Image (cartoon, rainbow, N blue to C red):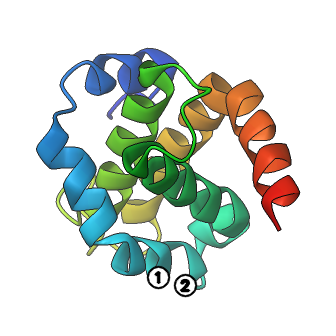
Amino acid sequence: MLNKPSEEFVKNGAQNVTEKDVEIVINKSEEIQRKFSAKGPLARFVEDGKLLIAIVKDYWAGAYRQVPYGMIASSVFTLIYVFNPFDLVPDMLPLIGQLDDVAVMGACLILVEFDLHKYKDWKLGQV
């Protein structure tokens, strides 16, 4: 049985994030967002998924830079992981295939929680 993906898994994955990965998240943001809005285990992360996509977009556009790049890299790694149907446990396996996505998302949120709350406050102030 595979170990549950942890914060260390996300940190290690974030170290390999490239500009191309950031562009993938930006270009595929609508498709990634649909993964969160679908019924199933990821549904509880709808708001967090939208925030991760938004912070990556705002960071890339230069609108919001008050965040360490490691937070962006962790977010990008997680969003690509969730988007990829062929990750540690393929998404084609009903329910089980999404549980690793939930674990990675949860680990990412633990890592980026503080910066994500600061970003959310900033974003609400922009309206």
Residue shown at 83% from the left, 68% from the top: 127
Query: Is 44 above or below relative to 89?
Result: below
The answer to whether residue 117 is left or right of residue 77 is: right
User: Which of label 1 and label 2 is nearer to you?
Assistant: 1
Amino acid tagged 2: Ala
Q: Position of residue 109 (x, y in %)?
A: 64, 36
Q: Which of 67/10 is in front?
A: 67
Q: Check disc 2 and report the residue beneath it.
A: 38
Which of the 4 image quarters holds residue 98?
bottom left
Q: Are marks 1 and 2 in contact (CB under 8 Å)?
A: yes
Residue shown at 17% from the left, 39% from the top: 19
Which of the 4 image quarters holds residue 3?
top left
Can residue 88 be seen in the rendering of this structure?
no
Which quadrant would the N terminus be assigned to in this image? top left
Q: Which of 29/97 is in front?
A: 29
Alpha carbons under labels 1 and 2: distance apart:
6 Å
Please tell me how crowded label 2 is: few (under 14), some (14-19), or many (20+) other residues with Cα within 10 Å.
few
Residue shown at 85% from the left, 58% from the top: 124
Q: Check disc 1 and report the residue beneath it.
A: 34
Which of the 4 image quarters holds residue 113?
top right
Residue shown at 44% from the left, 34% from the top: 72
Amino acid tagged 1: Arg
Can residue 15 be seen in the rendering of this structure?
yes
Query: Is 106 above or below relative to 28?
Result: above
Q: Position of residue 35 (x, y in %)?
A: 45, 75
Q: Position of residue 95 (x, y in %)?
A: 47, 70
